[in-house]
Image (cartoon, rainbow, N blue to C red):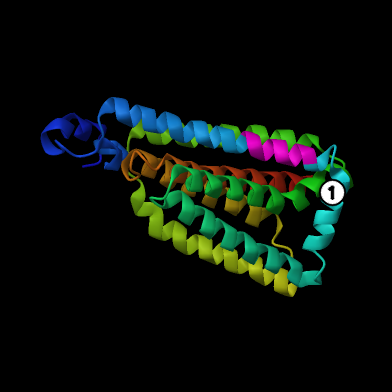
Amino acid sequence: MSDYRAADYHDEIYEGVDARSLPAAFAIPAERAAFIRRVYAHVAGALLAFVAIEFLLLVPLWPVSVQILMTMFAAGKYSWLIVLGLFILVAWLAEKWAMSDASPALQYVGLAVYTVAEAIICLPLLFLVTHIVGEPKLIGQAGILTLAVFGGLTACVFTTRKDFSYLGPILWVLSWLALGLIVAAILFGFNLGLWFSLAMVGLVSGVIIYQTSNVLYHYRTDQHVAAALGLFASVVTLFYYILMALLKSRN
């Protein structure tokens, strides 16, 4: 049962069950609303922390950024593969912590670690735009477009109230294909170009629809940290490829 109305039968079907162990769609309306508020409050908090870290690294601490970038690319063309591998490892670990039934403190550690990892993975592009290309306004434009797209996709899911979980296998395959192209581009030194960035914007938009649907229908109401981590990761990835597309279209 995927409609919000399923929650109306909560008292009859789930009597005696801890409300926090229920999927949001089957929780009582007050508990479901509180869960959704917690999820998006945590997404907002993670995004603000991400912006603060990037601002510190790009403005007052930009010499530190230079040292970080030199370390990241010290191994030549294989540097980005190493960084990508470490990022995937950190992402897996952070998600594992956030999804676990461990203490809330450990779940928050997972979200914090992932936020820092996202800031590091985005640093080369932001440093390029800010200090080499000299077009910091592109960052603001990308941020506005990202929030507009994310808001529109979220409103679409909340308005239609559809369960988009069927998109999962499709998005999984497309994501691995995209990762394969990125690895091939790094190894063989070819440019993926503007169209790849636009395709990634489309792919990540699909992921956001899928994850928002999961927030409504498949996450338990005590999994707000895990739900926030997934949405935060997608929003930052969307921002990254929108900024990349703006930069490539400018060139």
Q: Which residue is mark 1?
A: 64
Quadrant of the rendered structure where residue 90 is?
A: bottom right
Observer-nearest residue: 57 or 237?
Answer: 57
Q: Residue at x 67, y 35 (%)?
A: 143
Q: Is residue 54 magenta?
A: yes
Residue 118: x and y, percent?
64, 49
| Nearer the observer, 199 or 61 | 61
Q: Looking at the image, can residue 169 be seen? A: yes
119 horizontally vs 126: left or right = left
The secondary structure making up most of the magenta span is: helix
Residue ranking furthest to the left: 12
Kindly indicate the quadrant of the structure image that contains residue 180: bottom right
Residue 44 in percent (x, y) is at: 56, 33
- Give the residue displayed 25% in from the left and 41% down from the top: 2
Which residue corresponds to the image point at 71% horizontal and 36% vertical from the top-left? 52
Q: Quadrant of residue 222?
A: top left
Residue at position x 75%, y 49% from top? 123
Q: At which x and y percent is residue 144? A: 65, 32
Residue at disc 1, secondary structure = helix
Does the magenta run of residues contain 225? Answer: no
* Residue reaching furthest to the bottom: 188
Q: Quadrant of the N terminus?
A: top left
Mark 1 is on which residue type?
A: Val
Q: Which residues are magenta?
A: 48-56
- Nearer-the-camera pick, 216 or 141: 216
Query: Relative to residue 29, is residue 164 depicted above or below?
Result: below
